[in-house]
């Protein structure tokens, strides 16, 4: 578990959404998948989601699951409408040229290891 | 007073709303309107008495309502040091004035505070007449009051909604929500599910129940968007002990329901899969989220999906 600020301090990520107080956003778990239904089943509230999907549907899924931040990998670019919707929902969109595998590794090193607190 | 925190504090949960409020609230709504003012002829001695009496750290100087200067404690100290307490405030006041307009948004004043380091800003109307005084403390108070109003509004909605079933007497009371879902409307995909989840929370459902219903309805909503001929409808009936969610469309129908319920089976096209859908897990997810799921489908009448969640087993 660590704050989103710690993640931003340690991993080179570009913030696409409007600035928030990232030190107050606690990330308690992580999940990666590019299939929305799998995310629906596997991702926990307050977790970070790593994906290369960049379309507007990721915001709806994150909003429903109360996922505060999404890391979009391999330079996939969300469009303006997606970023606007994320701003509206208070969801942080982050971008990186690096692949999901590497990003998950970095998050793991930062201590984000729990995927399901109930397990 | 001027040392009170600005909005860039650590109120994380509300920070976005605070930022929004900065753009919504006008300076005129948060400023202090009861302002002690001096005329230019007021003597330093008189000014000192008034400042002590009202426990303020400075005051605007006006002529017939028009702002001509501002006198601060520092200016008065300067006069005292010079031993000139018999002189008028006009000699020592600051004439180089930074003002803000009452009709401007609070965020504009915040910018000025950040840039200039002044403790208080005179607020003027369109005719440059003084209408109030603004400190960072006023802004903080104004924002907190507005947030409180927001919070109370949501609390009232929640309270009213959660008592809906108790307040109305009938043999069987239920609330029905209906949403039209448009074919291929990926941009609004999930909007209905989010609204349903919010409604359930307002009605007093616990977070886990609301989340599970949200996920189930989301999958049903996306199925209507992706797989139907003409979109369809979501209908949610909320009763005190049960939530019934229904998705229906007019085609094309599912040939083999058993197969459709197999994890990983999907008829989604490559294009749909690129969007992140078509995992073949939608119906599987629904079944694991709700207590009961039944599906009827035919080529003639389309597909009806029923999902039921019982509330008895959990408190709420």
Image (spheres, grey):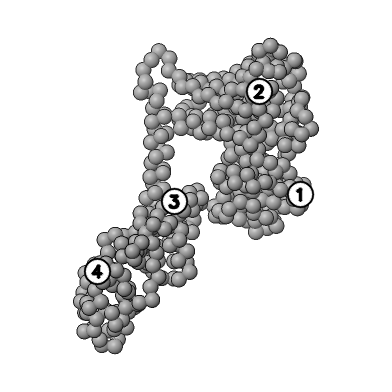
Which badge, 3 or 2, comes first in the chain's sequence? 3
Q: Nearer the viewer, residue A116 or A51?
A: A51
Left or right, residue B88 beside residue B15: left
Residue lying at 42% horizontally and 38% vertically, measured from the top left: B154
Foreground pick, B160 / A46: B160
Measured in 3D between alpha carbons, the distance from the residue under mark 1 to the one under mark 4, in whole angstroms, is 65 Å
Q: Compute the Cα span from label 2 to label 4.
A: 70 Å
Q: What's the CA distance linking mark 3 and mark 2?
A: 40 Å
Task: Tell me the number on the disc at residue B230.
Answer: 2
| Chain designation of label 1 | A
What is the number of the mark on residue A74? 1
Chain letter of the residue beneath label 2 in the structure image: B
Q: Is mark 1 in CB contact (under 8 Å) with mark 4?
A: no
For image coordinates 23% across by 84% down, the residue present is B87
Tell which circle, 2 or 4, labels the residue nearer the N-terminal end: 4
Q: Is residue B2 above or below residue B307?
A: below
Point out residue B216 in the picture as x, y percentages from the top left corner: 61, 27
Q: Nearer the viewer, mark 1 or mark 4?
A: 4
Q: Secondary structure at mark 4?
A: loop
């Amino acid at each position: 578990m660590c704050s989103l600020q710690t993640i931003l301090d340690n991993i080179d990520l570009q913030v696409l959404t409007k600035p928030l107080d990232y030190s107050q956003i606690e990330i308690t778990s992580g999940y990666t998948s590019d299939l929305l239904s799998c995310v629906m089943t596997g991702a926990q509230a307050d977790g970070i989601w790593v994906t290369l999907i960049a379309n507007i549907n990721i915001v709806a899924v994150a909003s429903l699951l109360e996922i505060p931040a999404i890391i979009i990998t391999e330079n996939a670019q969300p469009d303006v409408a997606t970023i606007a919707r994320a701003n509206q929902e208070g969801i942080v969109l982050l971008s990186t040229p690096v692949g999901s595998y590497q990003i998950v590794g970095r998050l793991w090193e930062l201590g984000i290891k729990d995927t399901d607190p109930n397990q | 007073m001027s040392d009170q925190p600005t909005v860039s504090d650590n109120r994380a949960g509300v920070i976005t709303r605070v930022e929004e409020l900065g753009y919504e609230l006008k300076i005129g709504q948060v400023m202090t309107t009861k302002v002690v003012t001096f005329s230019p002829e007021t003597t330093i001695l008189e000014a000192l008495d008034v400042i002590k009496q009202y426990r303020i750290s400075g005051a605007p100087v006006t002529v017939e309502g028009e702002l001509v200067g501002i006198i601060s404690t520092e200016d008065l100290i300067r006069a005292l040091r010079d031993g000139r307490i018999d002189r008028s405030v006009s000699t020592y006041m600051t004439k180089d004035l930074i003002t803000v307009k009452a009709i401007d948004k609070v965020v504009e004043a915040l910018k000025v505070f950040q840039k200039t380091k002044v403790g208080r800003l005179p607020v003027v109307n369109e005719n440059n007449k003084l209408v109030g005084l603004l400190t960072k403390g006023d802004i903080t108070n104004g924002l907190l009051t507005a947030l409180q109003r927001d919070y109370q509004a949501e609390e009232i909605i929640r309270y009213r909604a959660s008592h809906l079933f108790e307040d109305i007497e009938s043999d069987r009371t239920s609330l029905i929500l209906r949403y039209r879902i448009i074919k291929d409307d990926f941009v609004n995909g999930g909007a209905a599910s989010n609204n349903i989840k919010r409604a359930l929370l307002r009605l007093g459902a616990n977070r886990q129940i609301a989340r599970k219903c949200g996920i189930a309805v989301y999958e049903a909503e996306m199925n209507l968007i992706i797989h139907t001929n003409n979109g369809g409808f979501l209908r949610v009936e909320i009763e005190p002990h049960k939530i019934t969610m229904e998705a229906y469309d007019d085609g094309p129908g599912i040939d083999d329901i058993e197969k459709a319920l197999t994890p990983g089976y999907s008829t989604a096209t490559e294009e749909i899969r690129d969007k992140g859908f078509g995992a073949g897990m939608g119906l599987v997810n629904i079944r694991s989220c709700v207590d009961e799921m039944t599906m009827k489908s035919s080529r003639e009448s389309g597909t009806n999906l029923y999902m039921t969640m019982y509330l008895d087993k959990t408190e709420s």
